[in-house]
Image (spheres, rainbow, N blue to C red):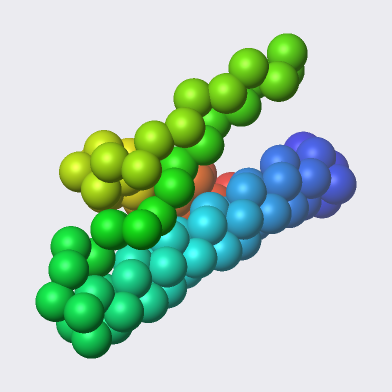
Amino acid sequence: MSPLKVATPLHRRKIQRDRLLETIDTLEAFEVAQIDDADETEANHFQGCILTIEDDNRRKFTTKNPVIIQAVAQFVNEICVNRLTEIEAGITIPA
């Protein structure tokens, strides 16, 4: 197998890995900032947040419910961590 045929898929996986790490770091930093803010006011740490999901036709779902926002943030984080594990398992150099 040529070196390019080996390197190209590895490079793609590395880019995916980097993007997932960035997303995970962003989510974790967001939650830490929310917890720090909530400590000052003794409120739920997602109180005051807004979650908006928009489709291709510009239809929107928006909520301020902190329970929903926390669940979505945790769910997205779990998906990213699981996907990161899958991608890292696929980053191997053939012998």
Quarter of the image where the N terminus is located = top right
Residue found farthest to the top: 57
Residue at image location 56% in from the left, 64% down from the top: 22
Q: Position of residue 30 (x, y in %)?
A: 42, 68
Q: Is residue 72 above or below residue 70?
A: above
Residue at the far left in the pictured view: 42
Q: How many marks?
A: 0
- Determine if residue 39 is in view: yes
**Percent x, y of residue 78:** 30, 46
Q: Position of residue 41 (x, y in %)?
A: 21, 79
Q: Residue placed at 36% from the left, 43% from the top?
A: 64
Residue 15's x, y, as percent? Answer: 69, 54
Q: Is residue 37 above or below residue 25?
A: below
**Residue 86 visible in image:** no
Residue visible at 52% across and 57% down in the picture: 23
Q: Nearer the viewer, residue 79 or 54?
A: 54
Tell me the residue at 39%/35% (across/down).
63
